[in-house]
Amino acid sequence: DIQMTQSPSTLSASVGDRVTISCRASQTISSWLAWYQQKPGEAPKLLIYKATSLESGVPSKFRGSGSGTEFTLTISSLQPDDFATYYCQQYYHSPLTFGGGTKVEIK
Amino acid sequence: QVQLLESGGGVVQPGKSLRLSCTASGFTFKNYDMHWVRQAPGKGLEWVAVISRDGTITNYADPVKGRFTVSRDNSKNTLYLQMGSLRLDDTAVFYCTRALGPFDYWGQGALVTVSS
């Protein structure tokens, strides 16, 4: 199975900050990586697919980068609505696997 | 608009069975592979199962293999997850999701609590 490792697990930031979340795959997944945002009590929401493509309707403040085994989600100018948990997920090979999540908290 | 609505969750004793349903609307259901993803309380996301568009191909995560069965009825736009031999660690919110690669739409989730 492909293991997805996210870091950090928790990130404290202030409104207006730019934050970066990392995701590492245990083997190459090309660009078959997605990022999701999840708020408490809600289903996850797709933000980024194919490592760098922005899902329709998602603001451009979210940017994905990387390929192979190293990936990054960058959120520019954090707003109160962005404080949530973020997950990466590989869809290169079954079983599909998620990272452990990164909780972005208000500092 | 695309909607996925799970039902059938509840409290069940260890070793018992439960069936979840997911009713889809707003898109051509038969054109999409469908998945189940679960989330234990306070934990991360775990992929559970997938079924192909025509229902002929299925695949399961190791922890549920042999206990869970995914199926679909394209005439009813409905996805199912039959869960058997339930264990305490199956307690989770179960989401149905649509996929053309990534999971672009999710249901609101159905809570399954396995407790004696």
Image: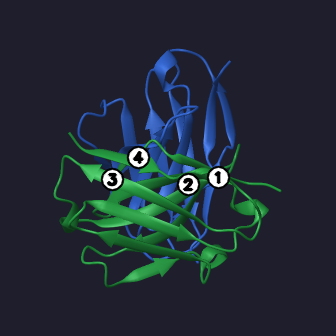
Amino acid on which the number 4 mark rests in the picture? Gly
Residue corresponding to mark 2: A23
Do the residues marked 2 and 4 share a common chain? no
Please report contact status of discs 3 and 4: CB closer than 8 Å, yes or no: no
Foreground disc of the pair 2, 3: 3
Amino acid on which the number 1 mark rests in the picture? Ala
Task: Give me the residue at 18% from left, 52% from top.
Answer: B27
Q: Secondary structure at mark 2?
A: strand
Q: Quadrant of the N terminus of chain A?
A: bottom right
Q: Which mark is residue B107?
A: 4
Label 2, label 4: how far apart the Cα atoms are: 25 Å
Q: Which mark is residue B23?
A: 3
- Upstream in the sequence, badge 1 or badge 3? 3
Task: Give me the residue at 53% from left, 21% from top.
Answer: A17
Q: Chain of mark 3?
A: B
- Upstream in the sequence, badge 3 or badge 4? 3
From the viewer's perspective, is B108 left or right of A105? left
